[in-house]
Each structure stands twice: as structure tokens, then as C-alpha cells.
Amino acid sequence: MTDLSLASSGASGPPARGRTAGPGALASSNGFAAEVGLLLRRNVREALRSPVIAFVFPVLFPLFAETLVASAYSRVSSLATFPVHPYTAYMAPGMMLLAGMMGSGYSATALVLDVQTGFLNRMRLLDVRPSAILLSRVLFDALRVLPAAVVVLVVGLALGARIDSGPAAVPVLLVMCSVWSVAYGGLFYIVALTTWNPQAPLAMSPLFILLMFTSTAAMPTNLLPDWLATLSAYNPFTYVTEGARALMTGPVDGGALLAMAGVLVGGVVLTQAFVIPLFRRAVER
């Protein structure tokens, strides 16, 4: 389950050349950043051994939507009231952000398994800060979605999407995707740390469908039924998507960007306000 070998925890000397530092290095480094870095590398190696949910799944559905769904709805953009042409350019911002939502249950499930297998207790014996364990998982979530976001964005551009704000908007869009992944993924951590069932976060995976189709990711407000347009106004994914769309197809709207920033920061703060106490309770069990 873990790459951090407990057998090396009692070693007094430095790690051998060419070998990855184990928990002994975590205990002796006595640095928060060092602990987070080592645990983050462990999370990456763990994910690379089973990459389907962590890295492959985040690409599949957004690419499916960008190719087949966008093709099926392409004629909608010919309507005079449709705001962006072609349809792929309208849909691309939401699909890039959707990549940040896919596979969100992976880290939450892995965290529960860390507790159930005793990994968390072993880290406590080595005086590893619990906050380093949680932060390494959150950072992994933020980094995990970047390859998928890049692939989805590049494919979207190849199919007709555009970034009118210029190349400088690309890193901003990727940061948005990472932060949105952390905010959305917090819901999965809450469920995992409440139920202690490693399957519960994975069972929440279809939630992205509800958020996507009750937002403006696939259709503008003026073309939605009244009840759905009203519902989309309460959907946080709407505001994140509109902020990304303002950067990609314009016009750059300060109000849309401010609303997007508020949702992203508020989402992270709100979910972590529940996750941190729940994780602290798990550590004290």
C-alpha cells in the first residue's frame, strides 16, 4: 500500500544513494515542507501503480463530451441568440473544468485506506504531522488533474475552441482547474471521513453529471427552461465555468471573474472547514 518502508525508520544514517527516503527521513527531517514533499511523492507513486481512476478517467468523459456531444449539438450555435461560435468553443471551458472533477473519490478513498491499514498510526509513531498527511493528499488532488486538463484543453483547441485572452490565460485556467478540483474533492473527503467506507466516495462519482447539466456548461441560460435556468443560478459550477469562458472566448468580464474567484476560494474554505476537524478526529481515534 505504501512506498515508505517502515524497515528504514530506525536507521541512524542518511538514506543510501539511489534509494527513496523512508519514514526515518520524515522523522529526522523535522520539517513540515519535507514531510509534505515525501508524502506527496509517495501519493504519486501509489497512483502510478493504478493509474486508471487517478489519471485516465479524468480524461475520458470530457473528451467524449468535446467530440461526440459537441458534434451532436453543433447546429445550436447557429441560433442568433447563441453567444459563442462554434459550439465547441462554448463547451470547452466547462469540459476542461470537468476534468478537475473526474476521479475525485480517488484520494479520499486512499486516505480512508491509510487509516484502516494502520499507515496513519505508523506515521504518528514517527512524529509526522497529521496536517502534512492531509495537505499532501490535497496537493496531489490539485496536481493530479493538470495532465487531464491540458489534454482536454489541447483537444478542444484542435476542434475549434479558442483562447481570446492569449497564451497568458492558459496557466490561469490550469490553476482554476486545480483549485476547483480541491474544492469539489472536499465533498468526497467529507463523505469518506464520515462513513469510513472506502467505496462511498467512489459511489459519488456520478455527481458531476448533475452539476454539469444543471449549469451553463452545455447551454446558455437564455436557451434553458425557466426552472433549469433558475437552478443553474444556484449551481457553483455555473460561476466557475462562466469565469473560464470569459478568459477563453471573452469578453473578459470582471464580474464573472470575481464570482468565479469567490466560488473557488469559498468552496475550498467551506469544504476544508469540515474535512480538517473530521481528519483530526480520525487521528485521535
Image (cartoon, rainbow, N blue to C red):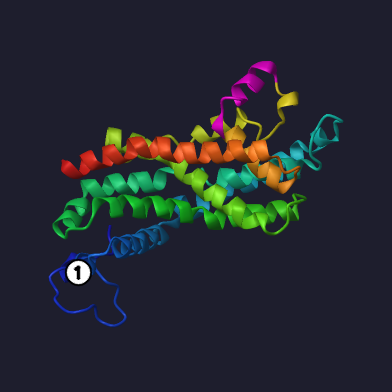
Is residue 242 visible in this depiction of the protein? no
Q: Position of residue 143 (x, y in %)?
A: 47, 56
Judge from the rendering whether residue 106 lies leftward or rightward of residue 83; answer left or right. left
Which one is in front, 229 or 259? 259
Q: Position of residue 21 (x, y in %)?
A: 27, 71
Q: Amino acid under label 1?
A: Ser
Is residue 275 visible in this depiction of the protein? yes
Which one is in front, 119 or 57? 119
Instruction: Find out whether residue 237 is within the magenta segment.
Output: no
Picture layout, residue 168 above or below residue 80: below
Identity of the residue drawn at 63% across and 44% down: 95
Q: How many marks?
A: 1
Occupied quadrant, residue 3: bottom left
Occupied quadrant, residue 90: top right
Occupied quadrant, residue 212: top right
Identify the main secondary structure in magenta. Answer: helix
Identity of the residue drawn at 28% across and 57% down: 1
Q: Position of residue 174 (x, y in %)?
A: 58, 53
Mark 1 = which residue?
28
Name, please, the residue furthest toward the top. Answer: 227
Instruction: Find out whether residue 230 is within the magenta segment.
Output: yes
Identity of the residue drawn at 33% across and 49% down: 110
Judge from the rendering whether residue 209 lies leftward or rightward of residue 198; answer left or right. right
Q: Quadrant of the C terminus?
A: top left
Judge from the rendering whether residue 18 lies leftward or rightward of residue 126; answer left or right. right
Q: Position of residue 238 (x, y in %)?
A: 61, 33
Label 1 residue SS: helix
Magenta region: which residues?
225-236
Identity of the residue drawn at 16% across and 68% down: 9
